[in-house]
Amino acid sequence: MSKLICLCNGVREKELIEVIHGVDIASLEIIQNKTGAGTNCGRCINTIEAFLEKQESKHN
Ligand code: FES
């Protein structure tokens, strides 16, 4: 099972990847709207942003 990113909403890495692949430009906002990750305590926001950066650098 993929890594749990957002404890509050039980969002896993796999779900973030699916969202990122489904849009042209992924942003924290899009992730929040589509998965709910980062919309509660906000503790996972840094992790989500780091994840987005990592995914972007893979495409460049
Ligand atoms: S862990 Fe993601 S909002 Fe709390």
Image (tube, rainbow, N blue to C red):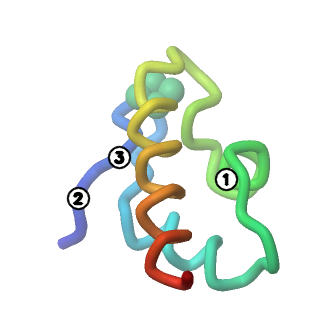
Instruction: State yes or no: Cβ of the residue under disc 3 lies below 8 Å from any atom of ligand 1.
Output: yes
How busy is the neighbourhood of tag 2: few (under 14 within 10 Å), some, or many (20 plus)? few
Q: Which image quadrant is residue 26 in?
A: bottom right
- Image position of 15 with respect to 31: above or below: below
Q: CA distance from mark 2 to mark 1?
A: 16 Å
Residue 58 % position (x, y): 44, 80
22 or 49, which lies in front? 49
Side of 22 relative to 10 (left or right) = right
Q: Which residue was labeled with disc 3?
A: 5
Question: Do residues under tags 3 and 1 come within 8 Å of each other at their CB atoms?
Answer: no
Side of 7 relative to 16 (left or right) = left
Outermost residue to the front? 60
How busy is the neighbourhood of tag 3: few (under 14 within 10 Å), some, or many (20 plus)? many
Side of 23 relative to 2 (left or right) = right
Q: Which residue was labeled with disc 2?
A: 3
Question: Do residues under tags 2 and 3 come within 8 Å of each other at their CB atoms?
Answer: yes
Residue at 63 percent across and 54 percent down: it is 35
Q: Amino acid at mark 3?
A: Ile
Outermost residue to the top? 41
Which of the two labelled residues, at mark 3 and mark 1, occupies the earlier sequence position?
3
Quarter of the image where the C terminus is located: bottom right
Q: CA distance from mark 2 to mark 3?
A: 6 Å
